[in-house]
Amino acid sequence: MMTDGPSNLGMFRTTFAFLQIPVFYLYIISVCYSDFKLKPKYLLHLLPFLIVNLVLLPRFYSVDTASKISFIQNRQNMIEIQFIHILIHLQIVIYLIAVFRVLRKSKKLYLENYAGKSISSYKWLFQFTIVLTILYAVALLKNIFKFSDYPYISEWIKIGLWISSLFIFCWYLFKALNNPGLFRNVDSKLKLVSEIVSEEKSSEQSTVNEKEYDEELLNLKRYMVEKKPFLNSSLTIQDISKEIDIPVRDLSLLINHQLGQHFYDFVNTYRIESAMNILKDDTKSKVTILEILYEVGFNSKSSFNTAFKKHTGNTPTFYRKSM
């Protein structure tokens, strides 16, 4: 026999909304960092979900069906419902800010320590988060209308959200299949150069004196020219550190702070210079742009074109024709 009206199971299922954004936050961390593992501390993300169910316990979960119906019918005046709506909107804002901070930091860590894949995956992930932010903003608008004198508008928005969610889900699947790796190789234990500089200032340590700086820079540039490590498409700052015997911390400061250039751009400069030499070589006029970009260490046409135009102001094709 089926029962009409609100039920404990139905309300409990509704409160699962408090798990959506924390799960998305953990997903973003798992995508950005290769060393991500589920830890007991992540159980703290369950707190809003647990708090909401505890709040509903006295006047919903513990009462009879008639009282449940009365609770729902008078939801606009129920302090529990008001608290729940404030909490979920606060949760969404806090978590979305946290997500954008994770994305920003992981991008900077990637640029400061890696020179492999392009950062187009980051751009997609950022776009996806923007779309979700808009979706949550529309959901907030829906809730405002739901408790206003125009509840029918809320229903129309609800239908629009369902349709939009379907399209977003399909778009996500398409992008995820085309970007299976995303970052995947960024170590969360790495520190941003700004953090390293701040630590050194607070501990009153000098980075490197002028003579040491010149020697290390000369050593680095000589190694880049003679050994051509940039031809390795998955080159990292750790790889160079081992070869030239400069600690990763000092090398990171040298490139990202002293030179004022991300490691990603620093390596791509050598790749582009190498590509320019090939493009200017008449004996290699039949070598395609695609062959050149792979030869000099790039692994995608889009990242090569972007770096080439940033360095020369022209596309590779136009540069070759102008020679």
Image (spheres, grey):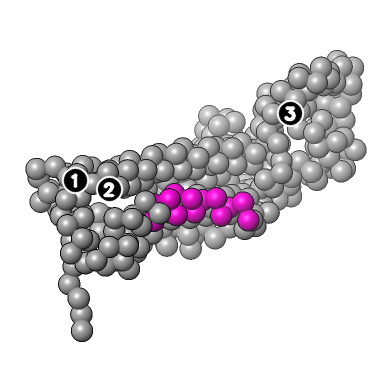
Q: Is residue 200 above or below residue 292?
A: above
- On the question of residue 127 being in view, the answer is no
Q: Residues within 10 Å of mark 2 (few under 14, many from 20)?
A: some
Q: Does 33 appear in magenta?
A: no
Could you tell me residue 178's position as x and y percent?
Answer: 49, 60
Question: Identity of the amino acid at label 1?
Answer: Gln
* Marks 1, 3: nearer the viewer: 1
In the image: residue 274, left or right of residue 132: right
Question: Measuring 70% from the left and 36% from the top, which residue is drawn there?
Answer: 191
- Farthest residue toward the bottom? 1
Q: Is the C terminus in the top left, top right, bottom left or bottom right quadrant?
A: top right
Residue 222 at x, y = what percent? 85, 32
Would residue 46 be counted in the magenta stretch? yes
Depth check: give the residue in front, 246 or 144: 144
Q: Position of residue 4 (x, y in %)?
A: 17, 72
**Marking on residue 76:** 1
For the residues labelled 2 and 3, the Cα–Cα distance comes to: 46 Å
What label sits on residue 59 in the rendered view? none
Please give the name of the residue rendered at 76% of the width and 19% of the height, measured from the top-left corner: 202
Label 2 vs label 1: CA separation? Answer: 7 Å
Q: Which residue is mark 3?
A: 196
Task: Point out the stretch of residues depicted in magenta.
Answer: 40-53
Dot 1 falls on a residue whose secondary structure is: helix
- Whichever of callouts 2 and 3 sits on the residue coming sooner in the sequence is 2
Q: Closer to the N terminus: mark 2 or mark 1?
A: 1
- Disc 2, disc 1: CB below 8 Å? yes
Q: Amino acid at mark 2?
A: Ile
Q: Amino acid at mark 3?
A: Ile
Tell me: 225 left or right of 158. right
Write the residue at 80% across / 33% down: 249
State how far apart marks 1 and 3 are (Cα): 52 Å
- The residue beneath circle 2 is 81
